[in-house]
Amino acid sequence: MESAWKSSETDTGDAAAESPLEETSCTSLGIHYWEDVKARLLDIIFLGAGASAAVGYPAMAGLRTQLLDRIKGDERNLLYELLRSEQSDAETVLQDIESIDSLVKRGLGKIFQGSSYAIFTDMAGQKHTVLFQQFVDLCLSLREEIRDLIFDIYQFRTECVPRLGPYSQLFATFGSKREHHIYTTNYDRIIEAFCARTKGFEVRDGFEYDSKTRTNLWRPVSFDYALPEDAVTVKVLKLHGSLDWKVGESGIERVSPEIRMEQRPTAIHKKDILIYPGSKEPPENEPFRTVYERFETQMKEADRCLVIGFSFRDPYLNRIFRDFVNSGKGHLWVMSKDCKDTVARNLLGLEKVDDLEPYLHTGRFVPIPCHFGEADWLTRLRNIELFP
């Protein structure tokens, strides 16, 4: 494409040099051509925890710190033990607890009953010895505290509004599209808040108001309604659920406020709809089945996928990302400080970062080693060639 543009300049000969108006028109034509090309590409934007950090929400490292600060008592001592490794975070802690819970549910916990003990060390260096069943109960109590805090920490806060600017820049970077496709593992409502507060944008999240029940019900067909002429449509699909998704009397609902129902069910709303960090459950139930199916289908058709702040530790999503990279049809752009390491080790299972060379050479993987929203993130993104 670049050579064709240069040949156009050459064909104008001296006339281009003599006529500023003609040169401006030619440049304008080139800009419009590239805008048209970008508008026709199928781009997917995938947001991990690092994308929400730009507006003040903690990524996994920050969540680790907040949990240690806010959880008290024996649960805090156990949390400290489970976070001993530098690679450990809230996700790995919940994975460990899920493994213990699974072991007990399968009846294998009986092996450790009676005379078996668990030993762990608190932040002061003091050792704690408890019976196995006490240890299990403590693990489950810690899990509930972590889930409660996730609800509290990731609720939408008005102080986030002045920091939504990077999202305007992000959407503008992908050209004059009538719709954007956002997939995210985040629970927060940043994208919804951005669209509600930004003129010319509308959000579609798969829910539709039902006049009969006076509730917002899960109706994924709403993603495919005709696009409005006077707004850019942002389709946001939450792969791990949302703080305001509940199981209600009429089905899956989007509600307000963001209150955790797991321990405080009501007559109207019975259950939260979230896939918590560390969960190994396959996304077989609604709304997750539909969201994952749409993601897999679109990734098979996509030209480019920009991943922001994601660590590639979800086995179901990793399979889809690997298929995309290995197909050779599209380009995976990954924005995070340690993007090469996470892609090499977590996504592709490579022994060394140097083994990424074939992916880098062909443009199947394009690293953007910065944090979303930091000083030069936009420049780094825009410096990527249209077709690496």
Image (cartoon, helix red, strand yellow):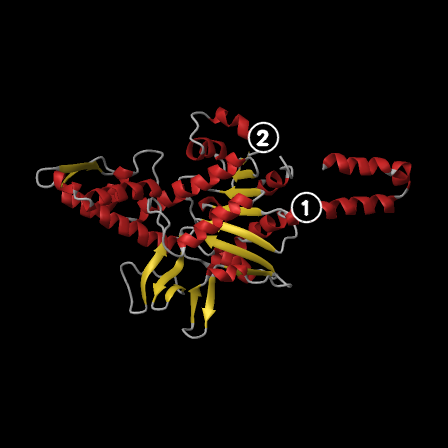
Q: Is residue 2 above or below residue 169?
A: above
The mark nearer the N terminus, 1 or 2, is 1
Compared across the picture, whether 298 is left or right of 257 comes to right
What amino acid does circle 2 point to?
Thr
Numbered mark located on residue 272 in the image: none
Q: Which residue shows up at 81% across the image and 38% down it?
A: 8
Quadrant of the snapshot with the C terminus: top right
Name the one closer to the observer, 326 or 168.
326
Q: Is residue 296 above or below residue 233?
A: above
Question: Looking at the picture, how far across and down is residue 129, in whole percent?
Answer: 14, 38
Name the one closer to the observer, 28 or 143.
28
Q: Which residue shows up at 8% across the image and 38% down it?
A: 115
Question: Looking at the picture, how far across and down is residue 387, in whole percent?
Answer: 64, 37
Residue corresponding to mark 2: 362
Residue 372 in view (yes/no)? no
Compared across the picture, whether 254 is left or right of 82 comes to right
Q: Which residue shows up at 52% across the image and 44% down it?
A: 300
What amino acid does circle 1 point to?
Val
Which residue lies most toward the bottom here? 212
Numbered mark located on residue 37 in the image: 1
Disc 2, SS: helix
